[in-house]
Amino acid sequence: MENLVQEAIQNVNLHAVMPSLILSVAGMALLLVAVFSPRGKTAHIAWLSIASLIVAGIVTIMGWNDTQYGFAGSVQLDNFAAFFSMICIIAAGLAILMSDEYLKRENFPVGEYYPLILITTAGAMWMVSGTDLITIFLGLEVLSVSLYILAGFFRDQVRCNEAGLKYFFLGAFSTGFLLYGMALLYGVSGTTKVYDIAAYIQANPDTTTNVMFVAGGLLMLTGFFFKIAAAPFHMWTPDVYQGAPTPITAFMSAGPKAAAFAALIRVTFICLEGMQDHLTTVFWVLAVLTMTVGNLIALNQKDLKRMLAYSSIAHAGYAMVGLVAWNEIGSAGILFYMLVYTFMNMGAFAILILIGRSGEENLTLDGVTGLGYKKPMLGIAFSIFLFALMGLPPTAGFTGKFYIFAGAINSGYIWLAVLGVLNSAVSLYYYLRIMIFMYFKEPQEDYAWVKIYPATAVSIVISVIGVLYLGIVPGSIMQLARMAGF
Amino acid sequence: MAIDFPLLSLLLFMPLAGALVCLVLGMGNSTAPRWVALLTAAGVFVVSLLLCLLQTPTAGWLFYEDYRWIEQFGVRYTLGLDGLSSVLILLTAFLQLLAVLVSWRQERAPGVFFALLLVLEMAAIGVLLALDLILFYLFWELMLIPMFFLIGVWGYQRRFQAAVKFFLYTLIGSLCLLLAVISLYLLHGDQTGTYTFALEALKQTELSTTQELIFFFCFMAAFVVKVPLFPFHSWLPDAHAEGPAAGSVDLAGLLLKTGVYGMIRFAFPLFPVAAQKTLPVLAGLALVGLFYAAWVAYQQVDIKRIVAFSSISHMGFVILGLAAWNQTAWEGSLLLMVNHAITTAGLFVVVAMIEQRTGSRSLDQLGGLWKSHPNMSAFFLLFCMASLGLPGLANFAGEILILIGVFTVKPLWAVIAVGGILFSATYTLRLVQGTLWGNNCEPHDKQDLHSREWLVLIPLAVLVVALGCYPQPVLDLLREPLSALLLVGGMP
Amino acid sequence: MITVTHYLMLSAILFAIGTLGVLTRKNAIVVFMCIEVMLNAVNLTFIALSRHVGNLDGQIFVFFVMTVAAAEAAVGLALLIAFYRNKETLDVDDFNMLKW
């Protein structure tokens, strides 16, 4: 018994979970701080959260190229995990920056908000570094449960309640599928460790035709597809994105989605390698379906948050093209694309925060009429993000798409790339429509309520720099993505 | 010859710097941006003039710059200048200078307006210099954004539709280009092991005929839309009619040129076999376009639309020259392109002046301007005569060279094309007759040309006459580069 | 003789019942209970398979699933209460502020 305990302790290796550990501890400590802070005083919690994110970020970066294994092979903090962790940290940092003034405007300045973001990020980091189905599941749930709360955070607003509930129901529902798939995989291979499952399949190649194994793999993938909002499992996305507090929407579309992609890549590329031939077909179809559905429905949207929600579905479709390629370039492409997407999408949402009035009823196409004249800097920043989302050079949207589609062509999926490019052409229409309202129509209002909140402005500036930097000199970051690729 | 000083980068980034200054100064809605824009445009013009004067007519690169950029993909920052690009850059710089002067009285957000003009200039120069396909694509796309806003924000009533139409047409074309570029790059990488976007390296890629044809069509999709060749032209009349005067000058002078430049610099040398095979199709479309556009121009009432369609008709002529695939015709095509840019710019400028004075662009309401505004009308007449190809004026030199060149290979095409010239005379004369003579309209502004307008029109008029009588300097610059490009393609 | 297959079939049936319930029932609480049925079907699978393959990993997994389900229940019910306070209904068809 004593030996077992000692062995377990030796296996722990806290270095492997250090970044997420920092965030969890900081999150719990800040929850306490929040309890003892008077209502309405939340700025200090926001800044402490950002400080802890910075510390976690530094620890993550220091661990680059120094793979740490922990908890008897349940956790593996490698470059892949570190890169995705950084995406989540950046997303969380930007979300916190744009939150404080927003919460005050929406008249709900409650301190628990920030610790929840930290804990979500910690969950995302377990998810990206997990090599055991249990770890991945736990990370996913820590992330999801905190996000359910955040999505329904404004408990006085019915819209927000509804978003939280819908997210909760569909999240829990998809968790059921994920777990059932994991259970079946466990039944076939007798282990929950990702690499052991792969080894089992290597030793018994006929497993890949085993009904239980195939069913388990597909059920698990279904669970992940819900999380990354791939069509036809995307129905929750528009409602939740529209109803949730805007910073949370921005965060959800970047950080947690990237984490889900990371876990999906790790599980499929290692465990389900035997099913590659069939799975690439599945991914091919889903990628095309996802981007087409997202783009086509977005064409018809008037509400900007909802339009960006559909656009985020379409962008998940572009990222899935990297899954089809099923190689190092493909996964490096996803890494790079998710980073790019974090900057461009969160930047766009930050603009929406500034434009919105309390209650955000005015975030429609008509609501930005002539904005470019009354608030020129906001207009320019918004245009940069929209051009990036379209995928035009010299923004990061172009380099990101380029990376993804080049990977697909390189693996011989020319048609996939063609369909992707056609989809980008369709997407131009609705992004352009925003710009047409912003610039081509005479302003109806003076936008006097638009105040440039300093912290939100900082997040916009960071996003603009990110979008332009990754668009003009993407070399070094691409190199890192390549090193992190699976 | 490579000199250490990055002259080409200077040329490229000067407009960008000017644009940023305009944007900052424009915050106060002052008159400063237009002076900055004028100085920048003048600076670019001087540098490009120097570049033209400095060089001796040879085939190689006169200036060349090459730096690392995105190493993972073998993307490099490669610029090169030869006689061909220097002529077109000089043209760009000259017209841009005029575009700034034309829009001198811009009241609405002048800072942004002039910044966009300068960004457009930078993008056009970039397209003419880039020798790396990704760099080229980047500038190609960058041309789109400022033009989109220039039409959409500063245009007339139906500007949204015109801007969106312009944007979608050209962008879908260039997405095809992008796909082809990536595929070509990967094919080349698979064959040689070195992944690069350098034009010279990619020319060595071995392609089957089918592959070549596919790639060629994708490249041409982007270029023919920009030219625009019939039947891909329908965005141009709208863009011209709804865009501001400076926008029209830039469209005719900068954007249209880049399409032809793309063909002879990229599409033809990269895929010579495919190009040879499709020459008859190209010539056919060019001839149909020549007549179709002339016919439609004859039906128009809006004088700006007449000029726009005449522009399509002339570009059909240019493409016909390219399709003849010999030295004389190509020189003629390039020369016609330069001349057409100058005459059309002149026409658009005068049309804008007419509209300013009469408040109308409709042939039904115009007339008798010769009496009320003799000086302006004289310039209009001069540009119209040049446009219909009167010997001794600019367009004639190009057209005759094209006809000679085409006649040596396909006499029938030349005969048909001559018919096109006659046709162009009819609508141009109708234009002249309808505006300058006939019923007197009541212009609310009686003033003839004022000093700034003289400043714009005189250089254009001088060039129209000079290039008509003595096009030799331009041809000297073009000769060697064109024959080198022709050699790569081989004779048909 | 009751084999692992029987357990698996039972849990598959339970899972299917849960799934159908989520898709068809109108009351949010019932939908929530159906999700719990799905999770418990998974737990049953894990335990049966753990016995079958002869190690404890599956049973450990079940502990985590139960913990997580409890946390989800807490959050989910809290969200339901907040919604009920504002709208005084728990019918899924009344989740219609946002286009479903």
Image (cartoon, rainbow, N blue to C red):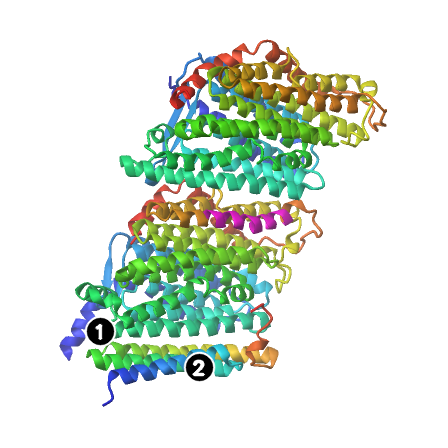
Q: Is residue B468 magenta?
A: no
- To which residue does mark 2 refer? C34
Q: Is residue B225 above or below residue A40?
A: above
Please, which residue is most extreme toward the left here?
A: A3
- Nearest the camera: B471 or B445? B471
Residue B90: which quarter of the image? top right
**Which stretch appears magenta?**
A421-437
Can residue A94 be seen in this snapshot?
no
Q: Residues within 10 Å of mark 2 (few under 14, many from 20)?
A: many
Q: Chain of mark 2?
A: C
Q: Quadrant of the C terminus of chain B?
A: top left
Query: Taking A91 as reference, is B470 left or right?
Result: right
Q: Is residue A429 magenta?
A: yes
Q: Position of residue A297 (x, y in %)?
A: 55, 58
Q: CA distance from mark 2 to mark 1?
A: 28 Å
Q: Chain of mark 1?
A: A
Q: At label 1, which amino acid type do we have?
A: Gly
Q: Is residue A87 above or below residue A442?
A: below
- Nearest the camera: B59 or C87? B59
Q: Is residue A90 above or below residue A398?
A: below
Which residue is depicted at the point 70% across and 35% down?
A: B107
Q: Residues within 10 Å of mark 1 (few under 14, many from 20)?
A: many
Q: Would you say the magenta stretch is mainly helix, strand or loop? A: helix
- To which residue does mark 1 refer? A190
Q: Secondary structure at mark 1?
A: loop
Q: At label 2, which amino acid type do we have?
A: Cys
Q: Secondary structure at mark 2?
A: helix
Which residue is depicted at the point 68% across and 19% down?
A: B383
